[in-house]
Image (cartoon, rainbow, N blue to C red):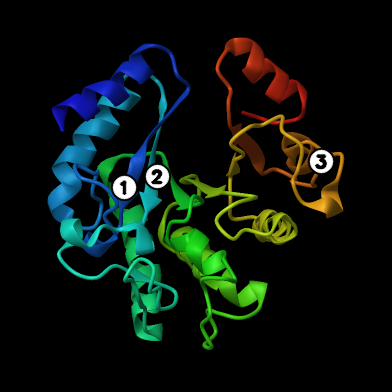
Amino acid sequence: SDDEHRWLTMRAEGGFGLVMTCAAHVQKVGQGFAGQLGVFDDVHLPGLERLARDVKAHDAVAIVQLHHAGHRSPAELIGTDPVCPSDDPETGARALSTAEVEQLVDDFVTAAVRCERAGFDGVELHGAHDYMICEFLNPDLNRRTDHYGGSLENRARLLTEIVSGIRERCRPDFYLSVRLSPERFGMRTAEIVEVYSMLVASGHVDFIDMSLWDVFRPVTSEEFSGMRLVDLFAGLERGDTRLAVAGKLYSADDCERAVDAGADM
């Protein structure tokens, strides 16, 4: 909408170095809320081009957050049953077939290509907050028996195939980020540490966006007892990959504390 366009461009005018859109759905069936930004069809290109142009006019980096709501897509909004890794009686979501997962990978990649065409500087994959990529990582929800379920490597395959596909089809300097939740939503902190390291080792990801809910809170998992969430991830080897953190950063002082703790942004 024009209101959201204005809301985002105001951030660029105000001096934000990076302006990221709301979660933008890569399939029509992946819509999570009314009025959501869509990136699943070329019909969206004029609006995306306008947004990219107006954000970049103020020298901000313009990034689209790519998203699929998975079992959190309201049936009354999408007009059909939602989809997710495995049948989920609680939400009425049905399991994706292997062919549908492969199509989902392609639709994420195609959406990134579409954003590049529109003039954006990069994309972020929303792999947090119980949305589709997060659902695949969740061993409680992902009970698949094909190569997208079972081991962590298999449960992360959706994510790693999307990352590889974007790197293959977008220009080398097109920014790529992944957002992750280290706790809640069925996430095992040790597994997310492994996914984080997997992404770093690939060399394909420019920054990893950790949604921590409270950056300075102690890690819940006993195996990391005594550590704060920010310290856990800032202490991991990340080479040229940058670490972004979010969670109860309400002032410049809070942000400075996060950077002092080792976060890049």
What residue is shown with label 1? Answer: 24
Q: With respect to residue 150, does 179 lie above or below?
A: above
What residue is shown with label 3? Answer: 235
> For the N terminus, which image quadrant?
top left
x and y percentages locating residue 117 in the rendered image: 28, 48
**Residue type for callout 3:** Gly
Q: With respect to residue 13, does 239 lie above or below?
A: below
**Residue type for callout 2:** Gln
Q: Which residue shows up at 43% across the image and 56% down it?
A: 131
Label 2 and label 1: CA atoms lie apart by 6 Å
Looking at the image, tell me whether mark 2 or mark 1 is earlier in sequence order: 1
Question: 167 left or right of 1?
Answer: right
Is the residue under label 1 in contact with that under label 2 (CB below 8 Å)? yes
> For the C terminus, which image quadrant?
top right
What residue is shown with label 2? Answer: 65
Farthest residue to the bottom: give it.
Answer: 145
Label 3 and label 1: CA atoms lie apart by 31 Å
